[in-house]
Image (cartoon, rainbow, N blue to C red):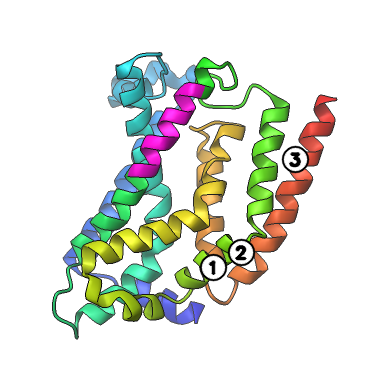
Amino acid sequence: MSTMIADRIRSMTGSHWLALFGSILAAWAVLFLMAIPAEMRELNAIYGADFWVSLCTITPDASGFARVLLMWIVMSAAMMAPTALPAFATYDDLARQAPGAKFSALVGGYLAVWIGFSILAAGLQMVLFQAGLLGALGESRSAFFSAFLLVVAGLYQFSPMKEACLSKCRMPMTFFMQHWDEGPWKNGLRLGLICLGCCWALMQLAFVGGVMNIAFMGLATLIMIFEKLPDVGRWVTKPLGLVLLCSAAYVAAGAL
């Protein structure tokens, strides 16, 4: 099954696929510019990265929230769109034989859910920053807070909700056959909500090591991609939960 999915992804050469892949690459390029370390920021003027780095600057006002929100939207798009490629590929195959299909509406509905998540995450980051629990780059300042987030994410890996959402993500053909009559926009929204149910706990771990930690973002994206693959996902989800719980214990013990 994973081989079939990989072959299908490699065959994505239409203009709509090129646009999607281009958007994903652009989002990752922006994340890289935003994550430039302080000692290298003198080069920003040369490469025009000053604006993107400024998005990481938190201020307790409306403009500060707008910057953090844009940062989360870019991060969510860069990390979550690749995890949905098998589902998008399945929809594209069905669209060739079914009326009323619209790829852009499906992707738009999917991303709309993650924009909603970004609004909540940005608001939470502002609240935690003002409470002194997060640093300027979104990293936890409290070992116990980090341990708490790791426990939440670890326990969620074993939850029925996580398993139910993953089961739908791993069978996109069944998902679309059940909900095709709802139309592409609602299908996209539903797919986004299922994906959110799979991944929200892992996404909130950005607060542990820093929201603009490019290594975390890359690793988390790969994990979430593998979790949704039908052949290998079952070997990822629960072992990852154990790793997260052990990490929580280690972090909490180090703070004692």
Question: SS of the residue at dot 1?
Answer: helix
Q: Is residue 4 above or below residue 151?
A: below
Q: Position of residue 137 (x, y in %)?
A: 50, 24
Using residue 30 as the reference point, say whether residue 156 is left or right of it.
right
Magenta range: 116-127
Q: Is residue 125 magenta?
A: yes
In 3D space, how far apart are the residues under numbered discs 1 and 3 (Cα atoms)?
Answer: 25 Å
**Are discs 3 and 2 less than 8 Å apart at CB?**
no
Total numbered labels: 3
Of the image marks 1 and 3, the number of the one nearer the N terminus: 1
From this viewpoint, which residue is outermost toward the bottom? 97
- Nearer the viewer's eye, disc 3 or disc 2? 2
Q: Secondary structure at mark 3?
A: helix
Image check: 35 left or right of 99?
A: right
Q: Quadrant of the C terminus?
A: top right
Residue 186, by quadrant, is bottom left
**Residue pointed to by mark 1:** 164
- Can you identify the residue that label 3 sits on? 248
Q: Amino acid at mark 3?
A: Ala
> Do the residues bearing badges 1 and 2 touch, measured as CB atoms within 8 Å?
yes
- Please name the residue that numbered disc 2 is placed on: 160
Task: State how far apart marks 3 and 2 are (Cα).
Answer: 21 Å
